[in-house]
Image (cartoon, rainbow, N blue to C red):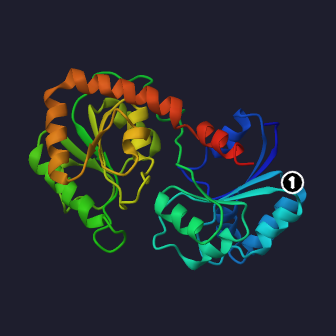
Amino acid sequence: MCAMRVLLPIIVHELTHCIGRAFEEEGHTVRVVDWRQRFREKRRIDVEAYCMAEAKDFKPELAFCQFQTHGVITHRFPQLLKSMGCFSIGWCGDVRSPLPDHYMEAAKHFDVTAFTNMTDVDTVRAAGYRSEFLQIGYDERIFNTDGAGERSGVVFLGNNYGGYKFAESDGRRDMVRAMAEAFPDDFTVYGTAWDNVVPAKNFGGYLPEPESADTLRRALIAIGYDHFHRPGFASDRILRATACGCAVVNQYYEGIEQEHPYVGAARSIEEMVKMVRYALDHPLESMRLGELGAANTLEQHRWNNRVQQMMAWV
């Protein structure tokens, strides 16, 4: 595939900030359009008009778009891209199930609508539109094994939203309680709002990105527990932890064996506790699995891998 001009109207944050770099490393010319930040600065800005103006000026051949919010764009933006001969991809990096109507409407106009779970992919395909599975990536410049030393303990990095925000918020809270009870001297949870859930000695507070990588490089075991159970869906938590060389015990999802062959996949909290106990009791085996997992993630799950996948669609 020859080099292309790539427009990225995306929500720039810690998960997506390195997508532009990945496209550039693959030989493409990139313009990032951080529409959410522009909206915050201008308040009354018409996001669609802003993105359309950027497209007209840049004249992209490929657009990778992440909006995810109702009312941000209409059919006009993808239709403009199509009129310019630009191949357009609309991507959701999170779960939106049941799928909102605006996603289905957008699928009529994007060349590809991509999701990080197969439930939403199948829903769009059943309606007669092209949809593909596109997993998230991670920033290998931050999350890696550089400087990793002696490892110990069990960590979980994630926030506590109680039972009101996501489908598995209660399950995550139950998991954290179970880990603190089973491993009172080895387990630490990092994130927000855990202070009333576990004893103080098991709560490490909130960690920004660089510090979370340092924590993962010191941990023997990391837990993965997401807010949704969907085929194919996993947050970047599993990528960050494996990339830093942790032995990872993750909640099971369909496809985990293929994506992460060196990760322990638990189908229940009880099974997760058993796997963690085994990993703690066999530290040399855990460290070896961490090394293999890090190599697999670096080879298979960088944003560069996702860019290569997208270029095969064009």
Q: Residue at x 10, y 46 (%)?
A: 182
Query: Whole-percent x and y of residue 269?
Result: 19, 53
| Left or right side of 132 for 166 | left
Give the residue pinned by disc 1. Answer: 58
Where, by quadrant of the figure, is residue 243 drawn?
top left
Q: Secondary structure at mark 1?
A: helix
Nearer the observer, 255 or 41? 255
Q: Residue at x 37, y 62 (%)?
A: 228
User: Quick one: label 1, few (<14), some, or many (20+) residues within 10 Å?
Assistant: some
Query: Would residue 292 be visible to someone looking at this image?
Result: yes
| Left or right side of 31 for 22 | left
Query: Would residue 201 be visible to someone looking at this image?
Result: no
Q: Quadrant of the N terminus?
A: top right
Q: Residue at x 32, y 66 (%)?
A: 161
Note whether 260 is above or below 179 in the view shown: above
Nearer the observer, 20 or 92? 92
Note whether 249 is above or below 108 in the view shown: above
Query: Whole-percent x and y of residue 114?
Result: 60, 58
